[in-house]
Amino acid sequence: MRLAIIADIHGNFLALQAVFDDMVRCGDFDLIWCLGDLAALGGQPHECVQALISLREKHGEDKVKIIGGNTDRYLVTGARIAFPPPKEEGEYAAFRDNILSMNAINAWNMERLTWEDFALMRDILGRELKLDVEGYGIARGFHAIPGDDESTALRPDSPDEEAADALLDRGGRLALCGHTHLALDRQVDGWRVINPGSVGLSFGNPGLAEWALLEWRDGALSVDFRRLPYDVEATLREWEKLGYPEMDWIRPKLGA
């Protein structure tokens, strides 16, 4: 059994292409799971959603599974991430600028989405994935934690008790998640938790596209964390040409 895991694409089309090309080099897979955050924040949301639709059409819905994340929900419902309000006047300007930047990016992303893009993102919200691997046990996939697409309880540095609480109401052996944009491989109270990192907006390796290849042989699991360079400057030039509204905000986040 071979399973490809991707997450947190965030509208970064060249990074997604680099991952798809690497998947081809790695051979065939039994399953490909995408764990959410397809479009928001990046400069090519439509292109990324369409690439995933094409992948699913090519291989079939039984093989390619796509679920939604918190930023997909923001685009679909108009919700926004909640920032703690500042307590001091000196913090207000930065807080205001962050709110305005996020609103501008989300509005611009929405302008680029077609009905087909929107319908896919609407239909994948709140979903989780489950796989029973012969000789190993149950693997579960979700965006952040089960039942909550915004929680950061499954971080590399989260306390063991916090991480274990996040998985209390699910049974299984392997938890596959995204959301934090940080690759992860840790044991949590009987679970092995894997985060492949982010395809398009890595916090741990800015400027690299991340995904993970999981393979079971005779009930034993091996995990290959893949890290791929892509042309960040070409990405930024394309986004600027398209009219991306917050180039100064996004540039350092891509490692440029």
Image (tube, rainbow, N blue to C red):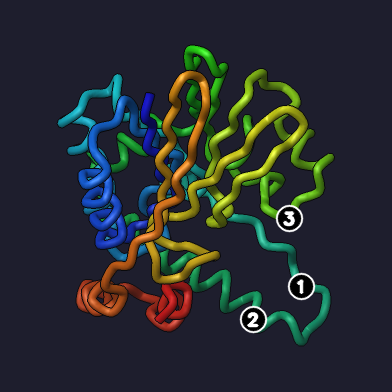
Kindly report the distance in space between the C-alpha atoms of the residues bearing marks 1 and 3. 25 Å
Disc 3 marks a residue whose amino acid type is Asp
Above or below residue 64? Residue 131 is above
Q: Quadrant of the C terminus?
A: bottom left
Of tags 1 and 3, which is closer to the observer?
Answer: 3
Among the two numbered marks 3 and 2 on one chain, the one whose residue lies closer to the N terminus: 2
Residue 157 is labelled as: 3
Residue 86 is labelled as: 1
Residue found at the very far front of the displayed protein: 218
Task: Give the image location of residue 81, x and y in percent.
Answer: 59, 55
SS for callout 1: loop
Task: Give the image location of residue 227, x and y in percent.
Answer: 40, 59
According to the picture, the residue beneath numbered tag 2 turns out to be 94
Of the pair 225 and 64, the residue shown nearer to us: 225
Query: Do the residues under discs 1 and 2 have CB atoms within 8 angstroms?
Result: yes
Kindly report the distance in space between the C-alpha atoms of the residues bearing marks 1 and 2. 9 Å
SS for callout 2: helix
Residue 50 at least partly seen = no
Residue 62 at least partly seen = yes
Of tags 3 and 2, which is closer to the observer?
Answer: 3
Please give left or right for residue 12 compared with residue 167 in the image.
Answer: left
Of the pair 247 and 109, the residue shown nearer to us: 247
